[in-house]
Image (spheres, rainbow, N blue to C red):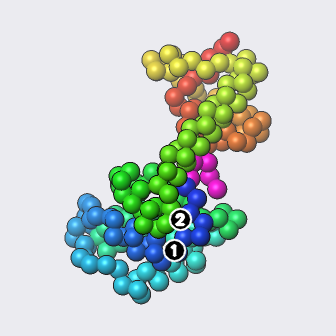
Amino acid sequence: MKPGEIEITGVNLKTLVKIAYGLSQPQGLGHFHYQKGDLSDEDIEAIVKGGEEDLEFIAVSMDYVKGRAVKLTVRRDDGRLSIPNKWFDHTDAQLRDLLTLCGFDASLIQEARDDKRRYDERCLAEAKAFLKEKGGSWSEERAKAKEDPLTKEQRDGLYVGLYSKTPSIKETYKNFVNTYTLLPA
């Protein structure tokens, strides 16, 4: 399971699909395809079956369904199911409703976000330590001023070095490499 995701192992996927659809609204061009009412049992079955036939790590994937921007993916990892701690194009209240209506405690949202924050902080510390070891440093001030941007070669070399040194920072590297600048010590 990815850091910061909400574990929903044990959820009835058909119930989840039905509730997620009900909490979603038409958006953009979805207004042209919008159909009032609930999903039929056949539609729900097709969505759940589509996840079973999809990649092994996707349990359910819903984008636009009958014009509604559902935008929900349920990940599968070693028999565990999870969803992101933010629901794209939905409010926190809708995510809380989704969890509670599926039988989960809404406090899982904050727990997952705290977990992701701690993960990012740990990864950033690992990245800073690696850069210091290599004779570089993080400079938030100069990065904010858009000074000394990394070249493509520096980014590629930094990525390879960081990933081989500390695999857990792969995601953090992607998040921070364009924000911070590698500068001589």
Type of residue at label 2? Val
Q: Nearer the viewer, residue 97 or 72?
A: 97
- Does the magenta run of residues contain 4? yes
Residue 88 as seen in the image, left or right of residue 161: left
Q: Quadrant of residue 154?
A: top right
Is residue 173 visible in the rendered image? The answer is: no
Type of residue at label 1? Leu
Q: Give the residue at mark 1.
A: 13
Q: Quadrant of the C terminus?
A: top right
Residue 183 as seen in the image, left or right of residue 29: right
Is residue 133 visible in the rendered image? The answer is: yes
Which is the main secondary structure of the residues drawn in magenta? Answer: loop
> How far from the left and from the top, in percent, is residue 178?
53, 31
- Does the magenta run of residues contain 26? no
10 Å neighbourhood of mark 1: few (<14), some, or many (≥20)?
many
Q: Residue at x 29, y 70 (%)?
A: 67
Residue 130 as seen in the image, left or right of residue 45: right
**Front: mark 2 or 1:** 1
Relative to residue 9, is residue 168 depicted above or below?
Answer: above
Q: Residue at x 49, y 66 (%)?
A: 103
Q: Are marks 2 and 1 in contact (CB under 8 Å)?
A: yes
Relative to residue 17, is residue 24 depicted above or below?
Answer: above
Residue 168 as seen in the image, left or right of residue 43: right
> How far from the left and from the top, in percent, is residue 140?
53, 20
Q: Give the residue at mark 2.
A: 74
Instruction: Specify which label sits upstream in the sequence, 2 or 1.
Output: 1
**Secondary structure of the residue carrying numbered label 1:** helix
> How far from the left and from the top, in percent, is residue 12?
52, 75
Q: Give the magenta-colored segment's residue range.
A: 1-5
Q: Residue at x 27, y 61 (%)?
A: 27
